[in-house]
């Protein structure tokens, strides 16, 4: 079976790439530390061309992924089996951050045989190892995951055993454990930065792994947040490579483009392709970088659901939204709400981002745990209606909501299927 799968997916490295640093741009030296490139790797981890390019490196002061990397065939893809867990192997692939989102989406639906979604909820809020309140855990398990199961949704997270991705994974696991129905399986898709994945070597095989056996590293006092294990409760992983090591955020560009591509695909209740797949960004807490994440979403007409009471950017935006009316100036209030929460030197820039978000406030909805877990799905579905570029008549709103609640898993063929040899479209 392994050899058959390898043969069926031998085309993958021809289409999907990884990134390698080709210019050693020295980072400011740390006392007693080896010479490091700004990409995050030491000198001895670079190819000879990168190290010997002394002239090029001498005139470069800032490392840039687009200029200082090259793309090569991916060397990590296939299935990953999480040792010590009972779940089925998950699909995975290492991809360049410049990967065509259409090819990535077709890989999931055509090769990995994961049904196209009726809805995508992209959960963001940070990958740091934080603790969240019991009410938020209940919202994830009884609200988000239950809604995803009933609507045929994909849940996107950072895919690592840390932060929000970890808690979403636990909610998916708990939901599956409590249900005896095969249809209760929820698709949780992790989009993680390759350079922050712990035990990468267990995933690397240029011919594909069927499966790769992944052992989660044991926590140690010396462990840092620069290498984090994959979360075993996810069905699939895109491990996004921008050529860096130990740097967060390398997946953001690819993830945003993938969300935008999926939002342009159609899923029809009667196979007519009359409804585009709704995509929703759901923010829980979040550091200052999440202002940019929310702004990019609403500017792309993707609605956002803020989880009130979760702290960080979610609370800041929810408070500004509650205390202002459309058209009112918000900068002064935004700066007041951000005091002591975010870096003081960034407040002017962040307040400008808040102002731009509030200009598109119709795309922003707030869920508070005071409304109860039972109301979560209703609020989520109503938030999705805000993502329509033109106001929908009541009948069309009913069609959208009815499609999500009553018609999961019905879909039309992809408008732009993956162009690979016919034998490459099956993973069976």
Image (spheres, rainbow, N blue to C red):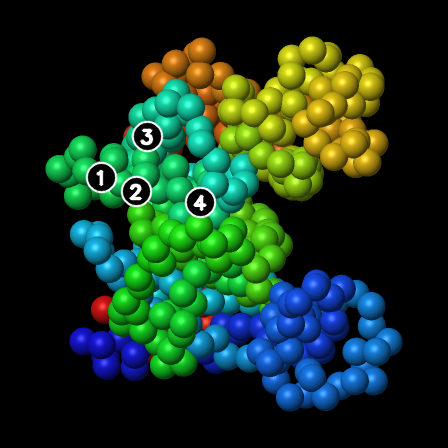
Res 365 → quadrant: top right
Q: Is residue 24 left or right of residue 143?
A: right
**Image location (x, y in percent) of residue 300:** 65, 41
From the image, state whether disc 2 or disc 1 is nearer to you: 1
Q: Earlier in the sequence, mark 1 or mark 4?
A: 4
Residue tagged by mark 4? Answer: 162
* Residue ID at (61%, 84%): 47
**Label number found at residue 141:** 3
Q: Give the camera-side residue of 197 and 300.
A: 197
Mark 2 surroundings: few (<14), some (14-19) or many (≥20) residues within 10 A? many
User: Within 10 angstroms of label 3, few (less than 14), some, or many (20 or more) residues?
Assistant: many
Contact (CB < 8 A) between labels 4 and 3?
Answer: no
User: Which numbered disc, 4 or 3, marks the residue that appears first in the sequence?
Assistant: 3
Distance of label 1 from label 4 (alpha carbons): 20 Å
Precedes in sequence: disc 3 or disc 1:
3
Where, quadrant-wise, is the N terminus in this rendering? bottom left
Q: CA distance from mark 3 to mark 1?
A: 10 Å
Pointer 2 or 1: first along the chain: 1
Residue pointed to by mark 2: 186
**Real-space CA distance between mark 4 and mark 3, rounded to the nearest whole angstrom:** 17 Å
Percent of width and height locating residue 87: 21, 52
Q: Work out whether residue 130 or residue 276 is closer to the camera in this orientation and state it.
A: 130
The label on residue 176 is: 1
């Amino acid at each position: 079976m392994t050899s058959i799968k390898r043969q069926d997916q031998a085309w993958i490295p021809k289409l999907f790439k990884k990134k390698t640093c080709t210019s050693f741009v020295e980072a400011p030296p740390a006392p007693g530390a080896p010479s490091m490139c700004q990409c995050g790797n030491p000198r001895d981890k670079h190819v000879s061309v990168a190290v010997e390019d002394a002239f090029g490196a001498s005139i470069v002061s800032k490392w840039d992924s687009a200029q200082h990397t090259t793309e090569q065939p991916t060397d990590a893809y296939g299935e990953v089996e999480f040792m010590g867990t009972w779940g089925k192997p998950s699909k995975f692939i290492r991809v360049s951050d410049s990967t065509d989102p259409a090819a990535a989406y077709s890989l999931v639906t055509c090769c990995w045989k994961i049904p196209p979604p009726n809805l995508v909820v992209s959960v963001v809020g940070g990958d740091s190892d934080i603790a969240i309140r019991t009410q938020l855990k209940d919202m994830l398990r009884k609200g988000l995951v239950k809604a995803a199961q009933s609507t045929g949704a994909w849940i996107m997270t950072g895919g690592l055993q840390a932060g929000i991705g970890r808690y979403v994974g636990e909610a998916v696991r708990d939901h599956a454990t409590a249900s005896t129905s095969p249809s209760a399986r929820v698709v949780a898709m992790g989009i993680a930065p390759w350079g922050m994945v712990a035990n990468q070597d267990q995933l690397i095989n240029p011919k594909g792994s069927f499966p790769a056996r992944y052992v989660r590293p044991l926590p140690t006092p010396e462990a840092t947040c620069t290498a984090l294990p994959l979360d075993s409760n996810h069905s699939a992983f895109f491990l996004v490579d921008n050529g860096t090591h130990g740097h967060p955020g390398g997946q953001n560009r690819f993830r945003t483009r993938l969300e935008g591509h999926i939002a342009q695909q159609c899923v029809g209740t009667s196979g007519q392709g009359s409804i585009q797949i709704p995509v929703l960004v759901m923010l829980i807490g979040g550091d200052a970088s999440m202002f940019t994440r929310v702004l990019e979403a609403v500017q792309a007409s993707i609605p956002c659901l803020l989880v009130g009471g979760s702290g960080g950017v979610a609370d800041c935006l929810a408070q500004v939204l509650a205390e202002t009316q459309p058209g009112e100036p918000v900068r002064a209030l935004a700066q007041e709400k951000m005091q002591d929460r975010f870096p003081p030197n960034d407040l002017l820039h962040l307040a400008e981002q808040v102002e731009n978000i509030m200009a598109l406030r119709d795309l922003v909805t707030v869920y508070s745990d005071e409304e109860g877990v039972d109301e979560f799905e209703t609020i989520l579905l109503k938030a999705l209606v805000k993502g329509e570029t033109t106001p929908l008549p009541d009948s069309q709103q009913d069609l959208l909501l009815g499609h999500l609640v009553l018609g999961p898993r019905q879909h039309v063929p992809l408008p732009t299927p993956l162009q690979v040899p016919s034998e490459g479209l099956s993973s069976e």
